[in-house]
């Protein structure tokens, strides 16, 4: 294995990944060939539930029932503190929309640009957790779980 050091972190590159370029346009294109199809799959899986509002409400009712049984149903109380304040609702919606994918993209670009040795770990963790989430999302909406 080839060893590379970034600060106190020692990274090892397996021999099987030596063909993978470290820098330049080829590396950027290869990363895009990994990330863009993953995002397209994400959108495809999410699209499978369009028009199934009734199923979503049934699942939400089940979740609320479980939360009540566990004594952790606080959502209504928390929402009531914000819903009467228009600015707070706007801020919460803005954070929800702009604090998800754009932040992930910004962090990924920052890591790819300035912390190249640590970027693959971030990318792989993101893709693996996303794959698990998409599978569970699909499974739940197929009413198999």
Image (spheres, rainbow, N blue to C red):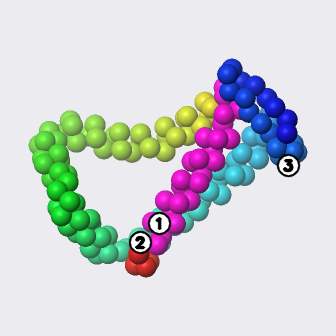
Verify whether residue 134 appears in magenta.
Answer: yes
Check disc 3 and report its element: helix, strand or loop. helix
Task: Decide which of 143, 31 is in the foreground and name it.
Answer: 143
Q: Position of residue 108 (x, y in %)?
A: 60, 37
Reading the image, the residue beneath label 1 is 136
Query: Is residue 121 toward the left or the right of residue 78 in the image?
Result: right
Q: Is residue 46 visible?
A: yes
Q: Is residue 92 above or below residue 134?
A: above
What's the distance in space between the residues labelled 2 and 1, CA to CA?
6 Å
Q: Quadrant of residue 7?
A: top right
- Residue at 77% x, 36% y: name it: 12
Q: Position of residue 87 (x, y in %)?
A: 20, 35
What's the distance in space between the residues labelled 3 and 1, CA to CA?
31 Å
- Residue at 45% x, 66% y: name it: 137
Mark seen at residue 16: 3
Verify whether residue 94 appears in magenta.
Answer: no
- Residue at 72% x, 29% y: name it: 10
Count residues near mark 2 (Cα–Cα under 10 Å), then give few for <14, some for 14-19, many for 20+.
few
The magenta region covers 112-140
Q: Is residue 88 above or below residue 37?
A: above
Query: Is residue 67 toward the left or the right of residue 111 in the image?
Result: left
- Ranked by sequence position, the earlier of labels 3 and 1 is 3
Q: Residue furthest top?
A: 7
Contact between labelled residues 1 and 2, with CB atoms less than 8 Å apart:
yes
Task: Decide which of 140, 86 is in the foreground and name it.
Answer: 140
Count residues near mark 1 (Cα–Cα under 10 Å), then give few for <14, some for 14-19, many for 20+.
some
Check disc 2 and report its element: helix, strand or loop. helix
Query: Is residue 67 toward the left or the right of residue 37 in the image?
Result: left
Reading the image, the residue beneath label 2 is 140
């Amino acid at each position: 294995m080839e060893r590379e050091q970034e600060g106190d972190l020692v990274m090892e590159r397996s021999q099987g990944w030596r063909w993978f370029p470290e820098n330049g346009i080829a590396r950027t294109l290869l990363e895009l060939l990994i990330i863009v199809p993953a995002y397209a799959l994400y959108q495809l899986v999410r699209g499978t539930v369009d028009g199934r509002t009734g199923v979503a409400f049934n699942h939400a009712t089940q979740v609320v029932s479980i939360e009540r049984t566990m004594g952790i149903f606080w959502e209504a109380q928390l929402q009531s503190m914000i819903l009467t304040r228009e600015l707070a609702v706007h801020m919460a919606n803005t954070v929800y929309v702009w604090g998800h994918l754009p932040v992930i993209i910004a962090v990924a670009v920052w890591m790819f640009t300035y912390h190249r040795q640590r970027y693959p770990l971030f990318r792989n963790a993101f893709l693996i957790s996303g794959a698990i989430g998409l599978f569970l999302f699909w499974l739940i909406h197929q009413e198999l779980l």
